[in-house]
Amino acid sequence: MTSPDDGGIRVVGDGPPPGPLPGRPRGRRWIPLLAAGGAVALAIAALVAHPAEPDSSGDAAPATPPVTAVASLPTVTIDLPRRLDLDTAAATPLSTRTVRRARALAQPRADEASVNAPVLVLAEDSSWRRLDVGDLRATTDASGNPQPVLDTTSLAGDGRRAAFAQRDEVVVVDLTTAGVRRIRVPGFNEDVAWLGGRLLVTQEAATYLVDGAGAPAKVPYPGRDVLLPTGSQAGVQVVQLSIGGDGHARLRHWRGNTGDDERVVSGVADLVSWSGPGWQQGQTAARTVWISSGPASAPSGPPAARVLLVDTATGAGRIAADLGDPARAGASVLGWHDATSLLLNAGGQILVYEVQTGTAAVAATVGGGPAVLALAGGR
């Protein structure tokens, strides 16, 4: 996690990373925190950082969508209640009352001491369950830095299973039965993500792909840079979206352990580091990125968090959304809602953002303090 090409991770809750960056921090630091209360401005904007190098394809730069304030956004109904109040005391133990499908997972994250806070499961009827099986504990990196057990990527797309990185193993909980499966993956496992029926497990210096039978195999690509696909895309190939030492995003496609040549993403430049995982819908990928205010070697101010959209077939990139105050909002994509819209967070509000039109609407508000959140969404 310390090499300049590994898509370095930043502590989003502590504000923007300083620039330039000589190195990247250790541990799972990109988990988005959804701060409760307070509207944060969401500006839907085109590229606002240092102008990117011209695209050799000659395509015109994307038009700048209008600026919209969170407070004035309309509301939209999705597969979530209008308000998510995280009350661990009132939640029913999952072992006594399972769910048919989880709509979301949440873990309160008020401070560093809350890494062992209970994981909550949002049921179909909008009531909460408390995950009381699996003996889950805060995971750590090799240096002993504790991290919340819940990842943004812990919940399977069908909402029926959840996976958690633990020391020397991955714990998979069947939320429909409260059954627990333990998959041995030796080492300091820090992140886990679903690739269809497989699991991608990331350590500081290694990544493992676990098949449906529970057999882990070491893979050559960095797990945190793997785009998380939707539905039937899972298993076709692995797409890596990373940041090079020159501040340009790079794409690489893998089939098995064989990768094609890296391709520089056109249309964007002066990228500093990622904030959260990348999500792929069709051939479009979305990932939040910190962009330098001017050349990365001589920035004029602090970097800004923006959503980067990349056509994985052509390598064309563009900046889509400004999530406002990143220290409060978490500045992260939570996944795809459907084929044309993303789920974003902003100041304790979950937004649906239409990629093509640049419009956004409020889907839910998170109450009860900061939290790590994983959504089943459109995956």
Image: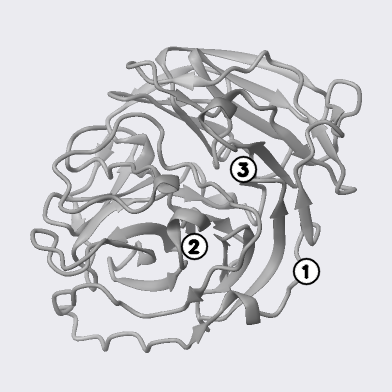
Nearer the observer, disc 1 or disc 3? Answer: 3
Mark 1 against mark 2, which lies toward the viewer?
A: 1
- Report, in whole angstroms, how far the alpha carbon at label 1 lies from the one at label 2: 24 Å
Quarter assignment of residue 268: bottom left
- The relative height of residue 66 versus residue 129 in the rendered view (above or below) is below
What is the number of the mark on residue 282? Answer: 2
Report whether 125 appears left or right of 108: right
> Where is 240 relative to 333, above or below?
above
Whether residue 226 sits left or right of residue 155 in the image: it is: left
Determine contact: label 1, label 2, CB under 8 Å: no
Q: Categorize mark 3 by other alpha carbons within 10 Å: few (<14), some (14-19), many (20+).
A: many
C-alpha gap between disc 3 and disc 2: 29 Å
Residue on which the image places disc 1 = 77
Q: Locate residue 285, reporting x and y percent.
A: 42, 60
Residue 237 visible in the picture: no
Amino acid bearing label 2: Gly
Three-letter residue code for mark 3: Ala
Where residue 171 appears, as percent x and y from the top left, is 60, 19
Return the x and y of residue 347 as percentages of the image width and height.
Answer: 57, 60
x 49%, y 62%: residue: 282
The residue under label 1 is which amino acid type?
Answer: Thr
Q: Which residue is mark 3?
A: 371
Q: Residue at x 40, y 80 (%)?
A: 45
Viewed as shown, does residue 69 lie left or right of 65? right
In the figure, residue 255 lies in which quadrant? top left
User: Coloring scheme of the render?
Assistant: one colour
Compared with 121, 67 (above or below) is below
